[in-house]
Amino acid sequence: MTRDTDVLVLGGAGVDTIVYVPELPLPYADSYMIDSGIRTRAGQTGDFVAVGLSALGLRTHHLDMLGDDPEGELVRALHQDKGIPLTAVPQPAGTKRAVNLVGPDGRRLSLYDTSRSHPDDRLPEPTVRALAEASRHVHVSLTHPCAHALPVLRETGVPLSTDLHDWDGENPYHEPFALAADVVFLSAAALTDPERTMRRIAERGRAEVAVATAGAEGAYLLTDGELTRIPAVPPPAPVVDSNGAGDAFAAGFLFGRLSGEPPRRCALYGAVAGAHACTVPSTETEAIGREELFKRLAEAEN
């Protein structure tokens, strides 16, 4: 079978409205003057992963539900601009959107509009199957339509990855994703014991690799039963925003994996890509390219 796509990204398409605030948490006040402007741009987790993979030269296809609305047009325009094929399933409730409050240190607080999605949302099974079978790998976002697609994806036999984001290790919603994927990404932010959670994922599910990112402290890599600490890579410029860093890490890691690199080197690719993302303002959707990735990695290793 011909694999015309390197990575199919499932779900995670949407629009964010970015507001730079003087501090987080934001103290109550009747109003704030936002001199930097309030901007709306396409780009949520699936979009960021797709952009990151494409920037590294991987043939990428994105599948999700989009509304017939201005937000949906922004998402379509982003993919067209980046040259990323997009299959958009109609979403009557509208395109997913969020408001991100970003502090001076780059931390963010996201407000998600849950009215734009429903538990019974579905991606058409024949579409999921056909696109997955034409792909070398599938990256699955943490959404209801993607949860329903997991059994079909497993039937295809195509390797899967997923990002559990700030999972606490207990919320049952995340478990089907964690147990179905061959590569599991998550943040250590809400975990008291990242190693325990990662080992539970590997023992109970299919994961060959589990990675927990820990910001400036680097990341934890679990593979073949061995836990390794991956050091953080210094950002090449001042940190302005952490939004999209985890998605960039996943894209860098998957680039390494699909290039045949061992897990530790894949994680270093991820660390470089994640550090770069922290230097990109929330109002932009840009990712590191392959040449720059290799250059930064060589600098970090010297």
Image: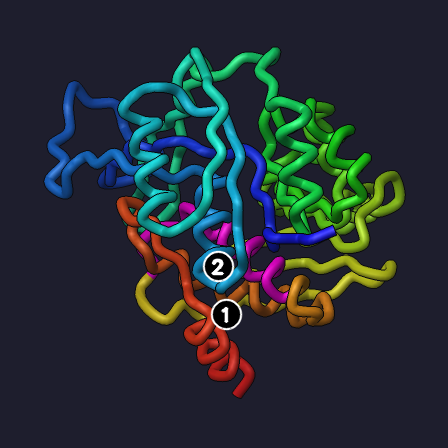
Three-letter code, disc 2: Gly
Magenta span: predominant SS is: helix
Q: Could you say which is closer to the camera, residue 139 or residue 6?
A: 6
Q: Could you say which is closer to the camera, residue 223 or residue 182?
A: 182
Residue 29, given in percent of the width and then of the height, sits at 20, 22
Q: Which residues are magenta?
A: 239-256
Residue designated by label 1: 233
Q: Is residue 245 located in the magenta-colored stretch of the structure?
A: yes
Three-letter code, disc 1: Val
Q: Is residue 48 above or below residue 227?
A: above
The circle on residue 84 is none
Answer whether residue 293 is visible to the viewer in this image. yes
Residue designated by label 2: 274
Residue 122, given in percent of the width and then of the height, sits at 60, 18
> Seen from this angle, which residue lies furthest front?
1
Q: In the image, what residue occupies the spot 67% across and 27% down?
A: 126
Answer whether residue 100 is visible to the viewer in this image. no
